[in-house]
Image (cartoon, rainbow, N blue to C red):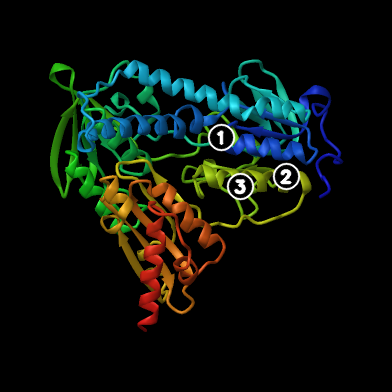
Amino acid sequence: MTSSVAGSQQSGSQRSGRNSFDVVVIGAGPAGSTAALRAGALGARVALLDRRRLGGTCTNTGCVPTRVLAITARLLRDIRGARAYGIHVGEPRLEWAETVARVRQTIGDIGNMKRVQDKLREQGGEVLLEGSASFQDAHTVRLAETGRELSAEKFILAVGGRAKRLPFPGAELALTPDQLIELPELPGSVVIVGSGYTGVQITTILRAFGTAVTLLETAPEILPPADADVSRELRASFERQGIRVVTGVSGVERLEQAADGLQRLTYSVGGEQRSVEASAVMLAVGWPADIEGLRLEAAGVQVERGFITVNDQLQTTAPHIFVAGDANGRDMLVQGAHFEAELAAENAVTGEAQPYSRLSLPSGGFTDPDHAGVGLTERQARDAGLDYLVAVSRYADLERAIIDSRTTGFLKLIAERGTGRIIGAHGTGENAVEVMQAAAAAMAAGATAATLAGVRFAYPTYTAVVGEAARKLERLRDAR
């Protein structure tokens, strides 16, 4: 590859000396860090900017903290179930302050492991944590804390997203998921509005911690992005755990303080107004791009429906500015952000126009039980008019699940009828997120049900459910 950035002529009196870069990356989360390191590896002089810290939402307030809390919840569940295996222990007690300390320690450990700052400096780049960046013109940004202005030929925006607040009276009284580990103590009861990936994870975490949870969702079922059978199975599991689930919510009317330190949330279902009281209300209702104060209009960058508009090459309406990660509203998954970031960096530095291939990205969450999916759901396959077959293998028929007393769940495989090629896999159950990686790898390789049916998965494992479902698919194809 040749670098179009390094050899380009910079324009304007500000583009010189220590404030001039080939590429400026704004946002130091998974997408930004990956983009900066890739651009540096290609020979560009890079500046990586963030308001205050490396790691972004994922490391500091999102995926990493949530996963630590999910492990804590899983440990509590397993301790409570230990008597079935002859281990007699008392009721476990959660010390919230110690749990939060563990979360913060893990955040630090992961930051130290990644060494983004050291690696970028070794490439000759800079990391600047000097407050918000704002565009002054198409090639210049100013840092809020120091007033320093930086210029560059190319920019990569990896600013991520922010928790959305619904516009109803009293919304300012509600929490957002990133505020959970800031609480001095756990709420005795909580209403969670929104059952996307974040909402359902927080729901089962808090329930395991002893909090009474009510989950509200506007869609007919929880976890709307998931396969319909996954949503139904997860809801049934939630309700068995004592979680109150309300779907079909048509609107949230208001939030107000009630007696005894509680909050009262008023909402509507089918034209009927209802209310619920709890110690706290949490909004998990959306994740628009975090662009406040960025002054994108000064750079000629267009925003639509809360996200920065990009083409297939991840360029904005200003062709020298690229976007990777949540801010473009495409995949909105860390695993997708890494691919987008590398592509944005390569296109920015080399001047090439490689299109982003929308891979079949596995997704899921560490609920209880886990849920996961990759590729087309059954509804998507049907709506696309595909001729397909579906096979389902249940955890209740899986030896490992019986051994572990984790028989709730299933894996569904969807394949083209004619070729047998796997086009979707979805499920819920213990270790479902890990199980789904086998299906994702098979799909990336273009594998057929016959190929998967011939794999001898280790015994006894949860991943063996993939082979079982594949063999069912093959029997369906043979019965044509």
Residue type at mark 1 is: Val
**Label 1 packing within 10 angstroms: few (<14), some (14-19), many (20+):** many
- Residue carrying label 3: 340
Cα–Cα span, label 2 and label 1: 17 Å
Cα–Cα span, label 1 and label 3: 13 Å
- Residue carrying label 2: 348
Mark 3: secondary structure: helix
Cα–Cα span, label 2 and label 3: 12 Å
Residue farthest along the bottom direction in this orientation: 480
**Res. 356 visible in picture:** yes
The image shows residue 259 at horizontal and vertical percentages of 13, 19
Q: Residue at x 87, y 41 (%)?
A: 7
Q: From the viewer's perspective, is the residue at label 1 or at label 3 nearer? A: 3
When the figure is inspected, residue 4 is found, relative to residue 358, above or below; the finding is: above
**Res. 249 visible in picture:** no
- Residue carrying label 1: 159
